[in-house]
Amino acid sequence: MSDKLKIVKEASIPFRNDNKSGPKYVTRGPNVDFGIVKILPGEDFTTHHHAEVEEIFYTVEGECEIFVDGELAILAPGDLVQVAPRTNHYLRNTGKTPWTAIFVKSPYNPKDKVDVDWRPS
């Protein structure tokens, strides 16, 4: 296969948390990250932002709360949220079913994550 074509079998890539939830990167770089994130009921993804990277989430199934700079939105299937660089975001699943989304991060910078000590009250 040429270096200009990359085919990945998504099913062969584990989720971060014991292969049950969290992110899984289907491909990383050289220009973009693409993956799937799953948050189980009762789980969250801590507040963070990216200095350079823009992040997009497209909800495939379930519902999830996302706080973007403290503002709450509820994501449902078919919803897309685009988070600009330097924008704090926090996700949590308060529902009864897993939330699954496709995410895209660009430009590629695997070290561009800044954890923020904030949780909604």
Image: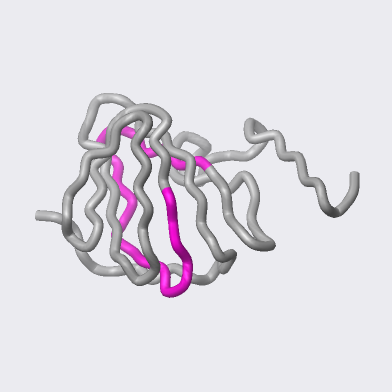
Left or right of 37, for residue 12: right
Image quadrant in which the N terminus is located: top right
Please say if 71 is above or below 59.
below
| Residue found at the far bottom of this picture | 51
Left or right: residue 58 compared with residue 46: right
Residue 23 point in image, percent of width and height: 48, 46
Query: Is residue 120 left or right of 117 when viewed as pictured?
Result: left
Residue extending furthest toward the right: 1
Q: Please give the name of the residue rendered at 70% of the width and 34% of the height, measured from the top-left corner.
A: 9
Residue at 41% in and 46% down: 57
Q: Let me know if residue 51 is in the magenta part.
A: yes
The image position of residue 77, as x and y in percent, is 35, 29
Q: Please state which of residues 6 and 82 is positioned toward the viewer in this rendering.
A: 82
Placement of the C terminus among the 4 image quadrants: bottom left
Does 51 appear above or below 72? Answer: below
Q: Report the number of numbered marks.
A: 0
Q: Main secondary structure of the magenta part?
A: strand
| Magenta range | 36-56
Residue under the image location 17 percent in, 49 percent down: 72
Name the quadrant containing residue 14: top right
Q: Is residue 7 magenta?
A: no
**Colour basis:** one colour
Q: In which image quadrant can residue 97 be found?
A: top left
Residue at 23%, 30% in the rendered image = 95
In terms of depth relative to the viewer, which is nearer, 30 or 121? 30
Q: Which image quadrant is residue 49 in?
A: bottom left
Residue lying furthest left: 121
Please provide percent x and percent y for residue 113. Answer: 44, 68
Image coordinates of residue 6 in percent, x first then y, are 77, 45
